[in-house]
Amino acid sequence: MAKAFMVVEVDYDPTITDAEVVSNALDVLLDTAKGTPGILDEVGNPRVAGFYPIDPEDIQHLHDISKRLLGQPQRDALANILHRLGVLKFPQL
């Protein structure tokens, strides 16, 4: 079985909640939806582990590092991470 990482952009009101609570609510929403018989049959019933919040500052930090002088293996690894996080459309730096 292959593994993919999906990036979901969520806007929320920080005066009401935080990213961790929103990710928990999305887990509940996904579990509820997966409870619908046959809902994912067409795509082979993938297992979805859950939602995990990523701090936008972490993404910016990785993007800043990508502009430093790095060897090609480090650039490739960083580009892959940024691509998986949705920062780079194509995994190239």
Image (cartoon, grey):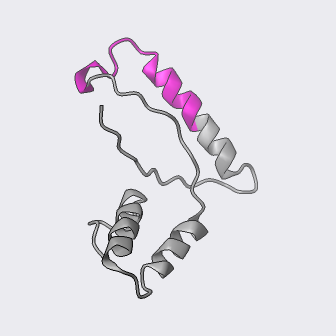
Left or right of 21, for residue 38: left
Quarter of the image with the N terminus is top left
Left or right of 87, for residue 53: right
Q: Hey, which residue is sitting farthest top in the picture?
A: 37
Q: Is residue 48 above or below residue 52?
A: above
Q: Is residue 67 above or below residue 45?
A: below
Point out residue 13 in the picture as x, y percentages from the top left corner. Answer: 67, 55
Question: Magenta stretch: residue 35 in it?
Answer: yes
Q: Hey, which residue is sitting farthest bottom in the picture?
A: 69
Question: Mainly helix, strand or loop, the magenta region?
Answer: helix
Q: Which residues are magenta?
A: 26-43
| Tally of marks | 0
17 or 73, which is in the foreground?
Answer: 73
Point out residue 43 in the picture as x, y percentages from the top left corner. Answer: 25, 27
Question: Magenta stretch: residue 1 in it?
Answer: no
Residue at the image position 56 percent from the left and 46 percent from the top = 52
Residue at the image position 23 percent from the left and 22 percent from the top = 42
Residue at the image position 35 percent from the left and 44 percent from the top = 4
Left or right of 76, for residue 11: right
Point out residue 70 in the picture as x, y percentages from the top left corner. Answer: 40, 82
Left or right of 11, for residue 41: left
Q: Is residue 78 above or below residue 67?
A: above
3 or 30, which is in the foreground?
Answer: 3
Q: Hey, which residue is sitting farthest right in the picture?
A: 15
34 or 15, which is in the foreground?
Answer: 34
Point out residue 14 in the picture as x, y percentages from the top left corner. Answer: 71, 57
Residue at the image position 70 percent from the left and 51 percent from the top = 18
> In the picture, residue 83 is in which quadrant?
bottom left
Q: Is residue 92 above or below residue 83?
A: below
Quarter of the image with the C terminus is bottom left
